[in-house]
């Protein structure tokens, strides 16, 4: 067979990451909004770009509330739970971090009980799952991490209001992706945050996805 087997020039994982980050920091200079971010915000955006290679979408779409990065670091380092809408986020989060800081990660969307509850209530499994998780955790500090389903955000906010939860114990990472209800859900979450003082990070517009949530959390873990 007329084919030559080759190996990549760079094999060391740390060297690969270092070169990737160097490349990002070189090219992101062409994106003025990145320069407006704080150092911690830049680290989050950089990690997201590393995950997606999407400079424009990340730098132009990401929104940080004023104290978001500090709040997330504080929550994580003090053992806050993370409620997610996808098992992809749960699986993607490094156990090195979640175990070190004792962050319980909950995603009940695939639980048989949640399927039953959703059918009984005539709603989606995402809605039933986030309500179950919030009910279980009561007033435990939680990070609500959404990377797929807009209904997660609507259901979480409804539950928080109706059950008069202490909003000082809540942070949103709102990054669902798609075409239906996505933009509206993020605008709704931003309005809720602005009117209540809840901190959060939002990937505005249609852009988003579970990998962005994971990269956001990993970036902030690294800053603790």
Image (spheres, helix red, strand yellow):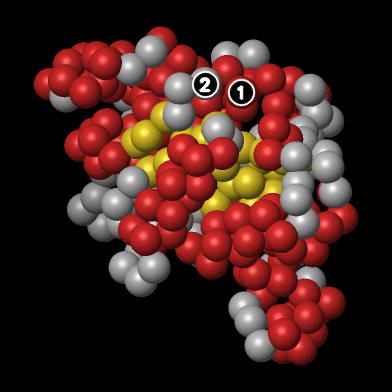
Q: Residue at x 34, y 41 (%)?
A: 52
Kind of element beneath mark 2: loop
Give the residue displayed 34% in from the left and 36% down from the top.
62
Left/right of residue 157 with respect to residue 49 in the rendered view: right
Mark seen at residue 116: none
Q: CA distance from mark 1 to mark 2?
A: 6 Å
**Badge 1 density bin: few <14, some 14–19, many ≥20, Cα 10 Å:** some
* Residue 182 in view here: yes
Q: Which residue is mark 1?
A: 71
Q: Nearer the viewer, residue 168 or 87?
A: 168
Depth order, front residue of 45/72: 72
Q: Is residue 195 above or below residue 108?
A: above
Residue linked to disc 2: 67
Q: How many marks?
A: 2
**In this orientation, does residue 174 appear?**
no
Front residue of 197 and 36: 197
Contact between labelled residues 2 and 1, with CB atoms less than 8 Å apart: yes
Q: Is residue 140 above or below residue 35?
A: below
């Amino acid at each position: 067979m007329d084919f030559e087997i080759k190996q990549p020039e760079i094999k060391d994982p740390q060297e690969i990451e270092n070169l990737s980050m160097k490349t990002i920091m070189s090219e992101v200079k062409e994106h003025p909004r990145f320069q407006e971010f704080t150092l911690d915000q830049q680290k989050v955006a950089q990690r997201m770009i590393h995950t997606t290679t999407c400079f424009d979408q990340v730098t132009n779409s990401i929104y940080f509330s004023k104290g978001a990065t500090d709040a997330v670091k504080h929550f994580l380092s003090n053992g806050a739970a993370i409620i997610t809408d996808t098992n992809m986020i749960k699986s993607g989060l490094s156990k090195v971090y979640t175990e070190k800081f004792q962050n319980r990660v909950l995603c009940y969307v695939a639980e048989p009980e949640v399927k039953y509850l959703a059918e009984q209530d005539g709603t989606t499994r995402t809605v039933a799952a986030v309500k179950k998780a919030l009910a279980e955790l009561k007033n435990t500090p939680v990070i609500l991490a959404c990377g797929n389903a807009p209904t997660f955000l609507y259901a979480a906010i409804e539950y928080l209001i109706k059950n008069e939860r202490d909003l000082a114990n809540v942070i949103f990472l709102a990054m669902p992706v798609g075409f239906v209800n996505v933009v509206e859900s993020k605008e709704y979450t931003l309005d809720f945050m602005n009117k209540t003082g809840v901190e959060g990070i939002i990937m505005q517009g249609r852009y988003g996805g579970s990998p962005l949530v994971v990269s956001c959390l990993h970036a902030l873990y690294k800053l603790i």
